[in-house]
Image (tube, helix red, strand yellow):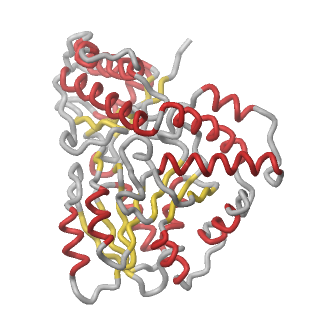
């Protein structure tokens, strides 16, 4: 028998109570019972996003909500400032290009975080038509967390709105949507919310709604305005992924019971343990000073084939981690400690890394990573 372990930064493991909820007989989505559930979910999402604003729900991957943040906000002749420090910063660039939006790019070296002053300087230049600034909370491809609070202060001083892809970081890294003046925060189901892919979310500030309402572009399936109107009746404008919402109801209960601040603290603790273990093996972190709580990016040691290492983990140990993307392909591997995860899961990941490295000729002292990770073990996990 071969058991599989999932440590990729999405999809993430799904708790048993969520799996069980998806197996129940399906509800019709235009009934009073489902409207009660939909209202419960939408109210619970506010706690996760740390906002008093409505959180819109879409049946799509997270990229659907990212696209919605372009088409609902920007029209012909508008400019977008895009912070590009990885594959998901690039995704905002690609989305803007697809809709003919003029782009002002702020490039950020991979493995580093954006400097809010660089954004401030671009916004201060005369003659621009920037309506929105697009940023990423956790750049999953590099493991970097960006300073959204600082960006919020900078953008709030302008007429532009701040749009944040928080898909990987939501409920793992701190995101105080209202307090940090984030105008549109985007999330998805398959990360720390512990549900299979297929749900996307967007919270909008009053400032964002003014921008949306002034946009002449017509939007249909991904219309923020249609979603808001339906949400007022505790419904979705189109047929929602009912079974996924039933699962989300269960995982949001888990998050509420733990408390969002404790959920974020747990992710921070798991990240610290993972990094202590990795360092104990003599491996180098890719972004040690700006690392997200969601995922740890580790440099492949010299002489080891990165693709072969990831394959060895998967085929030899039943452990799935993520390799590098783009220019980092074969150069890093990424261990997610995200969502339905605890200390013992981290120990499993670290022990498999030890084994696979030894298999490929990189000498690791057995148990050294586990010892490092366990030195500050707390029974709360």
145 up-or-down from 280: above or below = below
358 up-or-down from 126: above or below = above
296 up-or-down from 48: above or below = above
Residue 19 horizontal/vertical position (percent): 65, 30
Residue 49 horizontal/vertical position (percent): 47, 51
Is any part of residue 309 visible from this angle? no
Residue 326 shown left or right of residue 251 in the figure: left
Where on the picture, by quarter, is residue 274?
Answer: top left
Is any part of residue 329 visible from this angle? yes
Residue 331 horizontal/vertical position (percent): 25, 40
Of residues 238 and 158, the one nearer the viewer is 158
Q: Could you tell me which quadrant the C terminus lies in?
A: top left
Figure disc tally: 0
Q: Could you tell me which quadrant the N terminus lies in?
A: top right
Residue 351 shown left or right of residue 183 in the figure: left
| Residue at 34% from the left image edge and 76% from the top image edge | 103
Residue lying at the far bottom in this picture: please name it. Answer: 127
Residue 21 shown left or right of residue 290 in the figure: right
| Residue at 69% from the left image edge and 63% from the top image edge | 232
| Residue at 48% from the left image edge and 41% from the top image edge | 191
Of residues 123 and 370, the one nearer the viewer is 123
Residue 7 horizontal/vertical position (percent): 43, 31
Residue 227 shown left or right of residue 283 in the figure: right
């Amino acid at each position: 028998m071969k058991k599989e372990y999932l440590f990729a930064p999405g999809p993430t493991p799904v708790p048993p109570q969520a799996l069980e909820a998806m197996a129940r007989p399906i509800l019709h989505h235009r009934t009073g019972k489902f409207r009660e559930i939909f209202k419960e979910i939408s109210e619970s999402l506010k706690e996760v996003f740390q906002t008093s604003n409505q959180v819109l729900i879409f049946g799509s991957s997270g990229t659907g909500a990212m696209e919605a943040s372009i088409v609902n906000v920007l029209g012909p002749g508008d400019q977008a400032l895009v912070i590009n420090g990885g594959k998901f910063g690039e995704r905002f660039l690609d989305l803007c290009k697809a809709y003919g939006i003029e782009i002002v790019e702020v490039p950020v070296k991979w493995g580093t975080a954006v400097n809010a002053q660089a954004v401030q300087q671009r916004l201060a230049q005369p003659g621009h038509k920037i309506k929105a600034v697009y940023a990423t909370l956790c750049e999953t491809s590099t493991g970097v967390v960006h300073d959204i609070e600082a960006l919020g202060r900078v953008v709030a001083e302008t007429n532009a709105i701040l749009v944040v892809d928080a898909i990987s970081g939501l409920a793992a890294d701190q995101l105080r949507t209202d307090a940090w003046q984030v105008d549109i925060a985007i999330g998805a189901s398959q990360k720390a919310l512990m549900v299979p892919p297929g749900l996307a979310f967007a919270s909008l500030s009053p400032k964002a709604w003014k921008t949306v309402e002034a946009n002449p572009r017509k939007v249909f399936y991904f219309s923020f305005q249609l979603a808001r109107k339906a949400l007022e009746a505790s419904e979705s404008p189109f047929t929602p992924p009912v079974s996924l919402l039933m699962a989300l109801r269960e995982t949001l209960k888990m998050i509420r019971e733990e408390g969002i601040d404790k959920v974020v603290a747990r992710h921070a603790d798991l990240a610290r343990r993972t990094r202590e273990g990795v360092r104990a093996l003599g491996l180098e972190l890719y972004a040690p000073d700006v690392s997200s709580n969601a995922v740890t990016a580790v440099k492949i040691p010299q002489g080891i084939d990165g693709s072969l290492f990831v394959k060895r983990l998967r085929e030899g140990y039943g452990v799935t981690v993520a390799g590098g993307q783009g220019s980092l392909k074969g150069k890093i591997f990424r261990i997610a400690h995200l969502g339905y995860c605890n200390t013992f899961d981290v120990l499993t990941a670290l022990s498999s890394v030890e084994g696979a490295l030894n298999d490929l000729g990189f000498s690791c002292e057995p148990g050294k990573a586990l010892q490092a990770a366990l030195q500050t073990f707390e029974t709360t996990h």
